[in-house]
Image (tube, rainbow, N blue to C red):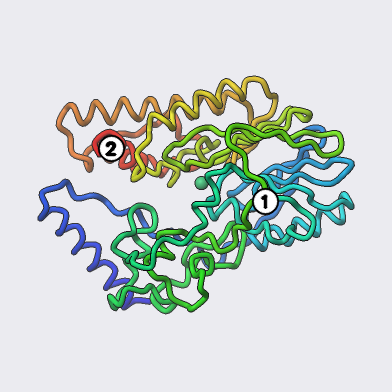
Amino acid sequence: MRRVNIIYAGLIAALALTSVAFGQMAPQMPELRRTPLDQEAVWTIEHINGGAYRAMTNNHGTVFVVTSEGIILADPLSYEFAVWLKQEFATRFGVPVKYVVYSHYHWDHASGGGVFADTATFVAHENLPAYLEMPPDSTTLSDVVGQYEPLAALDADGNGLVELSEVPKDLQRFPGSKQSIFEGFDANKDGALNGAEVVRGALGFVHPPDITYSDEIEITLGDQRVNLTWVGDMNHSSDTSLITFPDDDVILIVDYISFRLPNREMDYELGKFEEWMNAIRLTEEQAKKYEFTATGHGPVGNWEGVQRWRVYLETLQNEVAAGIAAGKSLEDMQRDIKMEEYSDLEGFDWVDENVLGMYHFLTD
Ligand SMILES: [Zn+2]
């Protein structure tokens, strides 16, 4: 562990020097994501309204609706959580999952659906399946950009593979799960991650959709409906569905809006900031029509939480733009932009990373 850490620090320094040598402002690599080894899984189910329930595993949330004919489940979140959910559904409701509807393809929301494959039909936007395809074999660890850069940088011996032995034991795990994301990346299960596997992401537990749609789709099961609406091609993903349960007055929004501060959802390496803001504005208008707004992270609230997220991003945009206009360095802005009025929200310690993300949106 210790040896790996020292080499890792050296690599970061080398990368920083390389950027300086190319005359750019040294970009700050995001931190390697970790899960404390002693973190307990906290799995909960709470009633929202009508047939709709909130299910959470630690910091990740989803929604399911119980109908007379079975259950419609949005994101399954992780394999271990899905196994627990399946038992709870059998005990509490005595009906199987008939539909799994995906908000988007990301590993920390879409994983685990295979647990329900014996009874469920899987539904997603038509842009989802392409994300599950493996990039070409020629892809190397140096092609990794953005949130997985620190994972690629763990290749301490420089052999082009991140072996399990090179990965810290507290590498991030699936939500509320003992499974390391290493297992999700390692598609060929050879105990080492190549460039293609890291670029694709930890998607090994994402069950592919049976039904895809382009603009919107309505599904009826028993006496309940679920609607999926595409919110457009934006930075967070090009396959994001806004999920609504009109018979239960519940809307589910995942990652492009959360009821905590943005984290990696900034996805600045993909650009498309204006497209993101458009999706947020469209969703804010939709959320006003529903009593309950659930997001992928944070407590169930209402449309005003969506409005607050939009205003946060607009304020951040204005502050970073003003900093750039005043000739401030990224580091100065990360130190000076506080966003204190959001200190009650979870993730408030990510403001400096949000400044980094906004800086890239405005300058790349
Ligand atoms: Zn996501």
How far from the left and from the top, in percent, is residue 78? 63, 58
**3D distance between C-alphas at marks 2 and 1:** 39 Å
Q: Secondary structure at mark 1?
A: loop
Horizontally, is 318 left or right of 213 in the view?
left
Q: Amino acid at mark 2?
A: Tyr
Measuring 49% from the left and 52% from the top, which residue is drawn there?
131
Measuring 70% from the left and 58% from the top, which residue is drawn there?
82
Neighbour class for label 2 at 10 Å: few (<14), some, many (≥20)? many
Comparing marks 2 and 1, which lies closer to the viewer? Answer: 1
How far from the left and from the top, in percent, is residue 221? 82, 39
Q: Quadrant of residue 220?
A: top right
Q: Amino acid at mark 1?
A: Asp
Is ligand 1 closer than 8 angstroms to the Cβ of mark 1?
A: no
Horizontally, is 102 left or right of 355 in the view?
right
The N terminus: image quadrant: bottom left
The C terminus: image quadrant: top left
Q: Secondary structure at mark 2?
A: helix
Is ligand 1 closer than 8 angstroms to the Cβ of mark 2?
A: no
Residue where numbered disc 2 is placed = 359
Q: Nearer the viewer, residue 140 or 50?
A: 140
Horizontally, is 225 left or right of 110 in the view?
right
Q: Are marks 2 and 1 in contact (CB under 8 Å)?
A: no
Measuring 50% from the left and 23% from the top, which residue is drawn there?
281
Q: Nearer the viewer, residue 267 or 2?
A: 267
Neighbour class for label 1 at 10 Å: few (<14), some, many (≥20)? few
Residue where numbered disc 1 is placed = 210
Q: Quadrant of residue 285?
A: top right
Horizontally, is 248 left or right of 259 in the view?
right
Q: In this picture, is 328 found above or below 186? A: above
Give whichever of discs 2 and 1 has the lower sequence position.
Answer: 1
How far from the left and from the top, in percent, is residue 102? 63, 46
Measuring 55% from the left and 54% from the top, which residue is drawn there?
108
